[in-house]
Image (spheres, helix red, strand yellow):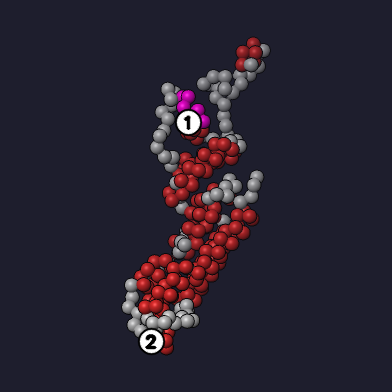
Amino acid sequence: MFVATQNAGQPELDGISDDRPIYLDGLSREMFELFLEHTFGRYIDMLFIVRTGSYTTDELSKFLYFCDMYQCHHTQEFVVHRIFSARFRFHPAQLINLAIKYHVHSIFPFAFQQLAETPITEITHSHRELMGEEVFLNIVYVQAALDHHCWIIAAEEPKILMHSSDCQDPTGCSEDWHVIWWNGMGWFLLDGRNPQPYSDAVKCFKKLKFGRVSEGCKDLMFKILDQGAAFHHAEHFISEACCFLVEKLVFEP
């Protein structure tokens, strides 16, 4: 084809020589070489230095852009897998941005969970721009709901509905359980300087002295705490909010 064009006196086509390279709009040489490295690496060891280490977050982001632009679905699966493997190197807002922009369902739930646990004061304006206003507003609402739920758990202890056979003072047992809960779990969950997640708060709570609470009643209530029923609601709430956003924002192209 190239020879026929030359003989016909037509202008030279892109790609015929180093002086007339094929220009791909919006694609850097480095990015294209990453694609070649992944796709043909085992065949071009003598032409390129094939990397064995990890990609940077910037390279993975650009790689995903390339796969989306040129519809390289198989390679995109590889890149998404690498991004998920390196998810802790990305800020969650970056992952949300990539998930929405390139329709990647698998990384959205992890990123949303991380943002739900990130203090609002640590989310910068640039993070808000990356995730978008709708995701940011949902994060605010989710955190407000979780805080309110945490306050309820801290202030309202699970009641001892039936005392064990070894409990000699049911009234004193219930009173001390109430006091120890507020001064223990209430403190661990609501500590302004170092609030504890529910699982860690329970571990610290079990180490306290329980006064008139009988051993049988204490063991019974510990089993209830270990089941974590109080905070299943929080996990369910986050999951519902996440699913709503995924269905609305992360659609199939």
* 48 to the left or right of 71: left
- Image-quadrant location for residue 202: bottom left
Q: Which residue is drawn at 35% across and 84% down?
A: 212
The residue at which mark 1 appears reads as: 37
Q: Label 2 is placed on what type of residue?
A: Gln
**On screen, residue 48 above or below 170:** above
Q: Which residue is drawn at 53% across and 70% down?
A: 145
The residue at which mark 2 appears reads as: 168
Look at the numbered discs 1 and 2 and tell me whether their residues touch, using CB distance below 8 Å: no
Q: What stretch is highlighted in magenta?
A: 39-44
**Which of the two residues, 78 or 201, is positioned nearer the viewer here?**
201
Q: Residue at x 54, y 36 (%)?
A: 75
* 18 to the left or right of 199: right
| Circle 1: element type | helix
**Quarter of the image with the C terminus in it:** top right
Q: Label 1 is placed on what type of residue?
A: Glu
Report x, y in % for residue 248: 64, 55
